[in-house]
Image (spheres, rainbow, N blue to C red):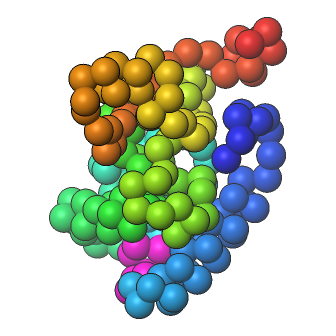
Amino acid sequence: MPTDAFDPHDHQGCIDDGLKAAERHCAKAGLQFTPIRRRVLEILLGDHTSLGAYEILDRLRGDGLNAQPPMAYRALDFLVTHGFAHRIEQLNAFIACSHTPGAHGKGQHTPAFLICRTCQRVVETETDPSAGELGRAAKQAGFMIERTVREAEGLCPGCAGGDA
C-alpha cells in the first residue's frame, strides 16, 4: 500500500480486494481459509488501524460468534504465518498486509509501518534492511539480516494539518 493510503478512500474496495486475493492464494496453496480466518482478515481489512486480539474477539462476538481467545489467536497466527497480516510490535496489535499474498518470496517482504498517534491509522510501506545505516552496520559486523521490524510513530497528513 502506498503512503497515500492516509488519504480518504473506499475501504470496501480494500476489503473486497484483500479477501479475493487471500481466497485465491489459499486455493492455490492448498490452505484452509475457514470462515473465522476470513472474518478476522475482513475485520483487519476494514480500515487502516491496527487491532488487538481482544478487539478482534469483541467484533467476532458482536457478529454472534461464540468466540474464545484461542480462536482469535489461532486465526491471527494463520494470517501472520501466511503473510495476510502483520503484528505491530509497538502496539501489540495486528494489521492486514497491504501486499498481494505470495507476491514476495520467503524473507523478501520487509515492511515498515507508519503509525499515526492521533487517528491510529497504520500504513505499511516497503523497506530494504540491507540498505542504509542498519545495512552498513550489519555488513561491517559480518551479520546477515533475516528480519527487521520498523515502526515509526508520528502524525499522518490529515492529523498534522496537511503539512506533513
Region rendered in magenta: 32-38
| Image: 37 above or below 86 | below
The quadrant in which residue 149 appears is top left
In which quadrant will I find the C terminus? Answer: top right
Across and down, in percent, residue 126 comes to: 57, 40
Q: Nearer the viewer, residue 97 or 130?
A: 130
Q: Is residue 143 left or right of residue 114?
A: left
Residue 35 lies in the magenta-colored region:
yes
The quadrant in which residue 148 appears is top left
Could you tell me which residue is drawn at 53 percent across and 61 percent down?
A: 104
Across and down, in percent, residue 157 comes to: 74, 20
Q: Is residue 93 left or right of residue 162?
A: left
* Residue 46 seen in render: yes
Could you tell me which residue is drawn at 61 percent across and 73 percent down?
A: 21
> In the current view of this chain or complex, which residue is farthest to the left?
70
* Residue 72 seen in render: no
The quadrant in which residue 77 appears is bottom left
Could you tell me which residue is drawn at 25 percent across and 67 percent down?
A: 74
| Image: 138 above or below 66 | above
Residue 6 lies in the magenta-colored region:
no
Across and down, in percent, residue 75 comes to: 32, 67
Q: Is residue 74 left or right of residue 156?
A: left
